[in-house]
Image (cartoon, rainbow, N blue to C red):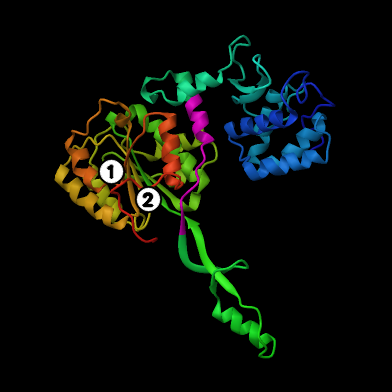
Amino acid sequence: MADDAPVTGRRTGPLAPPGGPEPVAVLTGFVRTLRAAGVAADHHRTRTFLAALGHLDAADGRDVYWAGRLTLCAGPDDLARYDRCFAAYFSAASAPPHRVRAMTVSVTRPVASPYGGRERETTGEQGDEQGAPPATASEIEVLRHRDVARMSEAERRQVHRLLALLRGARQPRRTRRHRPSPHGGAIDARRTVREILRHGGEPARLRRRVRRERPRRVVMLVDVSGSMAAYADTLLRFAHALVRAEPRATEVFSIGTRLTRITAALRHRDPGHAMDECSAAIPDWSGGTRLGEEVRALLRLPDPRGAIVVIASDGWERGEAGLLGVQMARLFRLARRVVWVNPHKGDPAYRPLTAGIRAALPYVTDFVAGHSLAAYEELAALLAGDRPVRAGGRGGADA
């Protein structure tokens, strides 16, 4: 570790200001700032960080710096981001001595509320005007339900930062493999017999086993045609959150005039870099849509079998609607669940009248909205198994 790292001396102000938030709230706000900057500071690393500071002086800036650097950074790429975030969040007097590329840092800091002891978060970017008012909890709540297509660029950036922190848990599925279980389950005959032979034929304790669980695979298709231009970027950022949460159980394709696999591009830790990689990989931005041909191309791959298939599209079909209906029927038989995300469904006046969506709906398990942050949170809960299958939807055994 370098001795010339950007640390300060004892700083009691940022961690325990008079009448301000608790130190734990300040530290967790710092971790959220790191996540927004692209550092892989997950919940496990956060617990380790707080546990390490339990043995150190949380009011000492040097202890806080090194505890976070050693527990929250996952690799060399995170060190420069960590130094920038630490300097911006705690207003350190010294900047990193290394010459690094200037970068924008989003700071999430809890502050004391003037209405009592409750806390709220302020978010801003380094370089903003000092007098800019922070976003309140009520403003964020309004932003959660606002249509992405009607947002300003600043509001859309705020939603993208929140999407990067979205929980990407996945509905579990039971596999054919087993694991030992000390607390019940079926009797493991092989291990039990080996245990008896090990004791010379004397009776021994019964060994038991249970089925292993793995996250349910998700295959997501994101429509990048011209009619979806206002939503495609936000949907890709939602897909990035899913890939980051379960990289081995998520496949993402773009659909327009062709089917393009973009999973590798979305595995980049930083959302901005991931979007740049997607832009380079997708050849048919803002073109037409041939949903029937692309679903047929997907069915030639092993990916949709037993998986949850998410199709994010408005349903405008330039090809033959009958072909889409035939291919959706095949997909419905192979997939565990078919979820159609339509941004226009968030409008109370919307009716599924286009030929493409009418041909696909009979073979859709869940037809949900995809126009706002709240809609994406509901979709994430659906994929995590927190929402039941729609009445009349298809069930079935685990695949």
Where residue 110 sits, quadrant-wise, is top right
Q: Which label is found at residue 110?
A: none
Q: Is residue 256 left or right of residue 355?
A: right
Magenta residues, start to end: 158-173
Magenta run includes residue 164: yes
Q: Secondary structure at mark 2?
A: strand
Residue in the picture at 68% in, 86% down? 198
At label 2, the amino acid type is Ile
Question: Where residue 135 sits: x, y (%)?
Answer: 55, 18
Which residue is painted at 24% across and 49% down in the image?
328
Residue 261: image location, x then y, percent: 38, 47
Residue 282 appears anywhere in the view: yes
Taking 6 as reference, is 355 above or below it?
below
- Residue corresponding to mark 1: 258
> What residue do we see at 83% from left, 38% from top?
56
Residue 308 bears which disc, if any?
Answer: 2
- Name the spot of residue 335 as percent of width and height, x first: 32, 54
For the residues labelled 2 and 1, the Cα–Cα distance comes to 21 Å
Residue 73 at least partly seen:
no
Circle 2: is it few (<14), some (14-19), or many (20+) Cα within 10 Å?
many
Q: Is residue 223 magenta?
A: no
How many labels, in total?
Answer: 2
Residue extending farthest bottom: 200
